[in-house]
Amino acid sequence: MKLKSKHSPQKNRKMVGIILLLTTLLVFVVLAGRLIKIVASDEVSGVSLKEKTKELYNGMDKISAKRGSILDSSGNILAEDSVSFSIYAVLDEEYVQTDGTKLYVEEKHRETIANILHTHAGIEKSLVIKQLTPQKNEAGDLITTVEFGEKGNGLNFDVKNKIEDELEKKEISGIYFREGKKRLYLNGKFASYFLGYTSITENEEVGMMGIEAAYDDILRGKEGSVIYQKDKNQNSIPGTEQVIEPAQDGAVITTTLDSLLQLKLEELLQETADKYKPQLITASLMEAETGKLLALSQRPTFEPETLAGLDEESAVWLNLLTEEDYEPGSTMKPFTMAAAMSEGIYDENERFLSGQLEFYDVSINDWNNGEGKGEMTFRQALAWSSNVGMVTLEERMPEKWQEYIELFGFLKSTDIKVANEVSGTVQTGTPVDRAMTSYGQAISVTHLQMQQAYTAIANEGKMMKPYLVEKITYPDGTEEVTNPEVVGTPISKEVSERVLEYMSDVVHDAEYGTGNQYAIEGISTVAKTGTAEFSENGIYNKQSYLHSVVQIAPKEDPKYIFYMTIKAPTLDGTTANDIISTVSNQMLTRAMTLRESN
């Protein structure tokens, strides 16, 4: 038996229609309510439509701050930021301003643009025409922005302005410039490890070595920001830029370096490196009364702008004057003499037998294989550089001598404000170790520690802190000036004068002096030479040596201290003192000549 529906088909269809109508009305009401809410609140899911519209048609970019320059002591630029430009063209015919002004390259202007770019930037006309002719990419889309190869990059202000002026006169649009930044080092190899270099990291210029790294936070300045309008293709519309926060340029750092002296030093060191092929060279010229570093360098070195020299397998990544310590050898002996004089356990006329000294379980030998030079006075011991003489003095003041090592600053970094400066070490495990420090073995120092210690001898007992930064000039005009700083008085004026007198014997004593090459005509100089075995993997190398000299001028009123080390040069019949004196004598002569002319 069939069951009949309560409703006829017509009624069912009517009911379905009513339900659909009500559903449609409900959806309409919900959508209308949502739309009204959006219009009223200007938000969707908490996101502001107004802000999104701004983002669509407005852009914001950072304004790079100009990195502060680094200057020499006379204000000459050593390192500075340089702006360069890359040229590009827009070919998109929809790239127009709201008033209809065309901002793209028109076909009728291609030949003229080619002539302009060839005249001022040297870009081949055929390349310009080719680039300005619309082409499609692999996806079949029109290429709307083009560049012009290597010659279209790295343009300076002058070229950019000439191109822009000529395009403006001819009312040609569509050619634009992207601004870039490059750090320039105007003198090439010039105190490279102390000036340092910069690298672009995450679109920021960052100091990577030397002053560039140590003072990076004040050199880099502070970025600003600019807003601009964008077209429908999200390209910026020229002329709509508005600075909302100006950039603040970095501080300017004035160094103590004298460019005339520094360039001379670089020239002399390069000649020495090329001729004698040493493993390493370090050299510096310091103002004795203040601690100012006037010139300093090392070999191997590198070009800060191109990093040529750091891209080799044998590259040295250390600032050898501050980051590497070494056993100085006999240039330590004037400090032993100064300590003995200060402690009153020294008589310059007392005699001892040079050559060999049995000391505990070892034999202390003088530099001529222990042969010695017979009996001599302790004053002659310094001129002749006797190890036996120094150990004899150390035996009389073993504990006090260790104190003088610290008083002369050998176990503390000079704090010259460059990265990774080391402090040096001293071996004190046995009496033999402690005795060896009196002639510069079993103790490790840095180049600048030696320079600092010698200021006490050259400057009436006052030890001056070395410094490289003369002043910092901030964007608001305020200055932070570095003043000379006395960091200790390890010896008296009288002792310093006596040590200088004995160091004069090194140069001028015909019989005992080991540094006659350091005499300079017309300039009274004093010096102390040094030759030290150097340790490799804990074993002393008996075949090659670290040679060094400290030379001070003039003797009567010291103005300059020159210190140089050279490791394992190829001597070929010459001597280390001949090599070093060629550099040091010229540097001191140049310094004294410049001083007299000022």
Image (cartoon, rainbow, N blue to C red):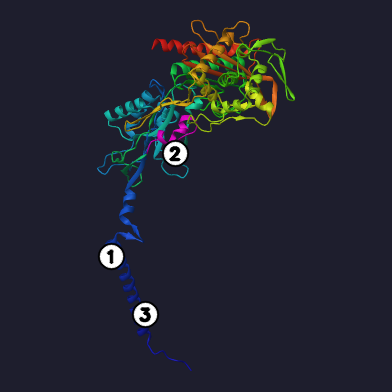
Q: Secondary structure at mark 2?
A: loop
Instruction: Find the residue positioned furthest to the bottom.
Output: 1
- The residue that disc 2 covers is 203
Which residue is depicted at the point 67% across and 31% down? 429
Disc on the earlier residue, 2 or 3: 3
Magenta segment, which residues? Answer: 201-222
Q: CA distance from mark 3 to mark 1?
A: 30 Å
Res 162 → quadrant: top left
Where is residue 484 shown, x and y percent of the image? 43, 24
Residue type at mark 3 is Val
Farthest right residue?
A: 361
| Marks 2/1: CA–CA distance | 45 Å
Q: Amino acid at mark 2?
A: Asn
Marks 2 & 3, CB-CB < 8 Å contact: no
> Residue 217 got which mark?
none
Give the label on residue 36, or none.
Answer: 1
Q: Label 1 sits on what residue type?
A: Ile
Q: Would you say residue 539 sits in the magenta stretch?
A: no
290 or 207, nearer to the observer: 290
